Image: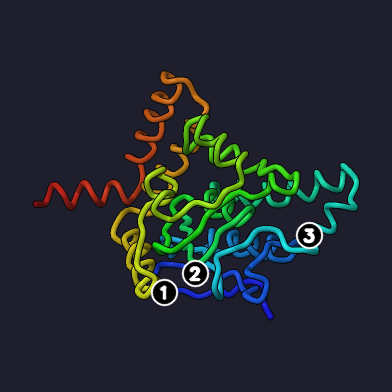
Amino acid sequence: MSNVLISDHETTRFITMNRPEKRNALNDALIADLKAALREADAEETLRAIVIRGAGKDFCSGADLSALQKIASASFEENVEDARSLAELFELIRKVRVPVIAAVHGRALAGGCGLATACDLVLATNTVRFGYPEVKIGFVPAMVAAILRRNLGEKKSFELLTQGFEYSAEEALQLGLVNQLFDEENFDAAVTEYASRYAAVSRSAVAMTKSLIYDIDAQDFASAIEKGVVANANARMTEDCRRGIAKFLEK
């Protein structure tokens, strides 16, 4: 059985984690296949959005038992290499040109919660449970801290990462960690409709905006504004922009 299933709906690529019997727990093979699927999708010029979702009852429950057993017996160097593999997945999501959307149902815990948070946009059913329970077993939700801290203030990030409790989809929405909630019964259709909105806007403009948003993360105000100037000028040179201006002027 494949670790991921790939399907397309018009201009949206769906990447489905396919380990339902393990609650889509992350292991080396699944992480590698997710990275390969994202790279393949990034090379498809016709795609406008990518959706990552989970088969079965849950989005992703974090690291699986075999991964935890490997961590317990590995050397420091081996653990660095293993952690870097997941970090590369989080980084790759930001480098892919089109929006990457997490479609979350059931539970998104530990590394699964980190995977959802790493995506550009997060959609969830109103019954989802999120959480970072790593600290309960002496583990640190480390790579996702870099992303969570960019989404939240220090104190709320500290609370979520160090107390290990689960929080609801509604709480995640209020915190700004989820973009929209949908009923579970209509979730797939709602996700498909949401992703399809990117077919109605310029692919190059969205790609450049995504790159700019993440590029200015650690910049001071003046540097961020200057990067915006360059991005603006680059956008004006694209075929999408020229066609859009010509269409606007024809009205």
Residue pictured at 39% horizontal, 30% vertical:
228
In the rendered structure, the answer to whether residue 244 lies left or right of residue 250 reads: right
Do residues under tags 2 and 1 come within 8 Å of each other at their CB atoms? yes
* Amino acid tagged 3: Ala
Which of pointers 2 and 3 lies earlier in the amino acid sequence? 2
Residue 132 position in % (x across, y down): 60, 49
Residue pictured at 43% horizontal, 25% vertical:
224
- For marks 3 and 1, give the one nearer the viewer: 3
Which of pointers 2 and 1 lies earlier in the amino acid sequence? 1
Closer to us: 159 or 17: 159
Residue 216 position in % (x across, y down): 47, 31
Q: CA distance from mark 2 to mark 3?
A: 26 Å
| Disc 3 secondary structure class | helix
Residue pictured at 56% horizontal, 74% vertical:
55
Considering the image in quadrants, where does the N terminus appear?
bottom right
| Disc 2 secondary structure class | strand
Residue 53 position in % (x across, y down): 52, 66
What residue does disc 3 label?
A: 67
What residue does disc 2 label?
A: 14
What residue does disc 1 label?
A: 9
- For marks 2 and 3, give the one nearer the viewer: 3
In the rendered structure, the answer to whether residue 36 lies left or right of residue 15 reads: right
